[in-house]
Image: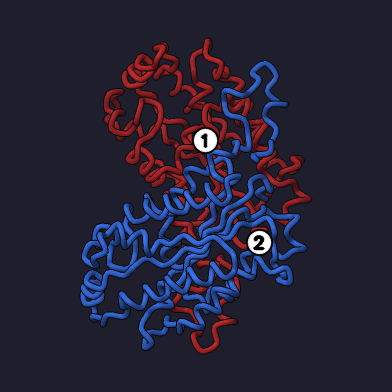
Chain colours: A red, B blue
Amino acid sequence: MAANIQDTIILFGDSLTELGSEAGGLVQRFSAVYKRKLDVLNRGFNGYNTRWALHVLPQILATKSEQPHVPKVRLLTIWLGANDAAIPSNVQHVPLSEYASNLTQLIRTVTDPSSAHHSTGTGVIVITPPPVNTVQWRAYKASKVPSEELDRLFETTREYAEKAREVAGGEGVVVVDVWTRIWKEAGEVEEGLSALLTDGLHLNERGYEIVFEEVISAIKVNFPELYYENLKETFSLFGEIDYANPGPSLQKRKIL
Amino acid sequence: MAANIQDTIILFGDSLTELGSEAGGLVQRFSAVYKRKLDVLNRGFNGYNTRWALHVLPQILATKSEQPHVPKVRLLTIWLGANDAAIPSNVQHVPLSEYASNLTQLIRTVTDPSSAHHSTGTGVIVITPPPVNTVQWRAYKASKVPSEELDRLFETTREYAEKAREVAGGEGVVVVDVWTRIWKEAGEVEEGLSALLTDGLHLNERGYEIVFEEVISAIKVNFPELYYENLKETFSLFGEIDYANPGPSLQKRKIL
């Protein structure tokens, strides 16, 4: 029974998105700046690759006939590849060519006019997976009981990030190249990534801060009407209320 | 175009709720434990009292005829009174008797069968305002340019918290007595509140942690089916996927 009062931003992806609801995470940072403007929905799924995500995305987006009745998705981020890039013996592995085709299909779920979930009012941003620190990740896997072998390679994740850039470019959607930005921040040495990752694969608060800044900048440039500072609050600020006759000043208003 | 895929928890109130989307705040803590289960919506409005909130609540809740088409509100928290309790010369002030009547009307928006927004499937929790530290708040107001006078009194906020307990009890809804819990944590001395408040009125991370624990405990006791550990994720965990034939194991499922 939540009324259709605020439109939404959907953050879709794997554990990098799911863990973003923790303090300092990507979802939390988005929620803080978009409060009273857009609802930020965490649609992150720990461990998922693009093959499995393909089954889920159509279920979390309304069909064209449902769209008039539910909150609009103003922005959709797709952040997948960190699990696809696992080594071939790992059940999460998805070959690079299939990753490209799956990512294309995920994007087209929204952008293709023939898709049941096509939406012209939804901005799409593809985020590349961050680089892996195999020194940290190897130690983390070894520390498990029973201990596990290294299942991610630095060079492989780089290839998947490159492929994500290529696919997003080909599809004409915005890409945020987290891989390159994080790699530069680490001084382009694998050990330097320890300052940005908790375990070699997942981001710490500083890592999330960088991703947040990159995605917000991409919004400001590519979808300026959705940049949080350009939106009004759905309901009046305290100082905008007509205290003598509050009712009319407390009606829902357009935020953009 | 967000599909109706997850039900919601609505946190409704003033700045104590609105600021809860910051790292360590109440909304963030709820979002982290309910991710993949229920969407937690921040409906906090800085500076609002119950008089103004009365105009807003019906707009953020679906009417009975809309309810079948939008996400269900499984839980609604109402956390107001910190601004009503301002001194009479402050525009935010609402007399105690009107506070009681407004709070009653807010609750009945959901619980009264004759209300256009009546919902049997929504649990209601009233949260009492926390105690004010006038030492801290006086200093904060004095530090403004131009400086402002003290506009909250310790004893007054205590009365509003008592009234909230009384109203909630009379209406048969759950009350979480944050005032008393925070006061005890402060050793029942006003200066002790500095460890829990940022400025004498608003909560810091430790203050929010206590509120979170109290509200979550109230959910566990009064609405055990909604306690986060008793809910399944909307979509399968990674380990529950049928890797050979993933489709059927990746359909949306009932979480309770």
What residue is drawn where x is 39% and y is 19%?
Answer: A154
- Depth check: give the residue in front, A111 or A190: A190
In the rendered structure, the residue with mark 2 lies on which chain?
A
Residue B69: x, y in percent?
Answer: 74, 55
Residue B176 image offset from top left, x and y in percent: 46, 60
The C terminus of chain B: image quadrant: top right
Circle nearer the viewer, 2 or 1:
2
The picture places residue B113, in percent across and down from the top left corner, at 73, 68
Q: Identify whether A155 is placed above or below B124.
A: above
Q: Amino acid at mark 2?
A: Ala
Amino acid carrying label 1: it is Trp
Q: Chain of mark 1?
A: A
Q: Position of residue A85 (x, y in %)?
A: 50, 21
B54 versus A1 height, above or below: below
Please name the residue that numbered disc 2 is placed on: A3
From mark 2 to mark 1, how far is it between C-alphas? Answer: 29 Å
Residue at image point 37% right, 65% down: B130
Residue B111 is tagged as: none
Q: Which residue is mark 1?
A: A79
Q: Viewer-proximal residue, B186 or B86?
A: B186
Write the residue at 67% across / 16% down: B244
Answer with mark 2 or mark 1, whichever residue precedes in sequence. 2
